[in-house]
Image (spheres, rainbow, N blue to C red):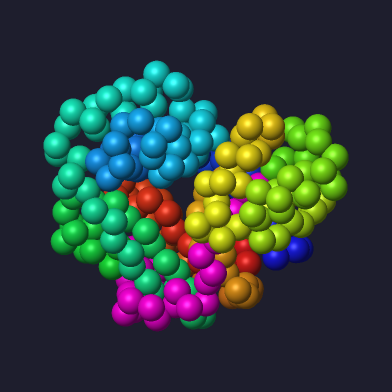
Amino acid sequence: MSGHSKFANIKHKKEKNDAKKGKIFTIIGREIAVAVKEGGADPENNSKLRDVIAKAKANNMPNDTIERGIKKAAGDSSADNYEYVTYEGYGPSGIAIIVDALTDNKNRTAGNVRNAFTKGSGSIGTQGCVSFMFDKKGQIIIDKEECEMDADDLMMMALDAGAEDFSEEEDCFEIITDPDDFSAVREALEKENIPMAEAEVTMIPQTYVELTDEKDIKNLQKTLDLLDEDDDVQYVYHNWDE
């Protein structure tokens, strides 16, 4: 994992997110609703809800907004209508793209996602056509400037809590976990007040592809922008080496 932490991209993504807080809060709000429906409104007894709350806080969602979302979901049966769907496909030059969506209308979402791929000269594929190129992992990024703990102590804490890998980059630390151990590792760091720039279960590319053709870059960016604008789309993973 070392050498490709993508912290610069995360910072860039955060800046974009700050400009689109409404979109981010909608995404997290839906995740809160589904987590509450699946496991109840008490974070103490619902690890998935705890993880979503941690993600909400990392994105500067106010506590009262989080609490309102939990209360609304606990008393709102319409949240049951949301379901997770995943699409896989190819961008220009065979760039692998995975799209995670949370929707109450699969036909609408499928049409929008297909349109985004088509407009960027890409194509939707079958389930599993590109996901084998990614590893599903828990990923925690810690900004060095925000962390006062010594690197060796941080590494030992993370590994003792169940982390698979710890790497030190120029401006951050990256902790990788098995998805099943993610909550335990994140909570161990949280108890020690370690600030996390990003903490989520994600899809990490096994290899990255560089694009040199300006037309390919423009087309891929068009697809990613269209997906980013779609309220149903939660996360987009790709193996483009930006």
Instruction: Judge whether residue 28 can be spotted in this image.
Output: no
Above or below, 75 against 197 in this view is: above
Residue sitting at x 76%, y 63%? 3
Query: Is 205 situated left or right of 141 in this image?
Result: left
Q: Quadrant of residue 223?
A: bottom left
Residue sitting at x 39%, y 36%? 45
- Percent position (x, y) of residue 23? 38, 39
- Percent position (x, y) of residue 188? 63, 40
* Residue sitting nearer the eye, 24 or 143: 143
Query: Is 142 situated left or right of 183 in this image?
Result: right
Instruction: Judge whether residue 124 can be spotted in this image.
Output: yes
Residue sitting at x 37%, y 59%? 100
Above or below, 92 against 52 in this view is: below
Q: Residue furthest top?
A: 64
Quick check: is 100 in the magenta stretch?
no
Above or below, 84 against 60 in this view is: below
The number of numbered discs placed on residues in the rendered structure image is 0
Quick check: is 126 in the magenta stretch?
yes
On the rendered image, what quadrant is the C terminus found in?
Answer: bottom right
Query: Is 61 situated left or right of 72 in this image?
Result: right
On the rendered image, what quadrant is the N terminus found in?
Answer: bottom right
Residue sitting at x 16%, y 54%? 105
Query: Is 94 situated left or right of 144 in this image?
Result: left
Q: Quadrant of residue 74?
A: top left
- Percent position (x, y) of residue 201? 50, 54
Q: Quadrant of residue 137?
A: bottom right
Q: Which residues are magenta?
A: 116-141
* Residue sitting nearer the eye, 50 or 58: 50
Above or below, 9 against 53 in this view is: below
- Percent position (x, y) of residue 163? 66, 55
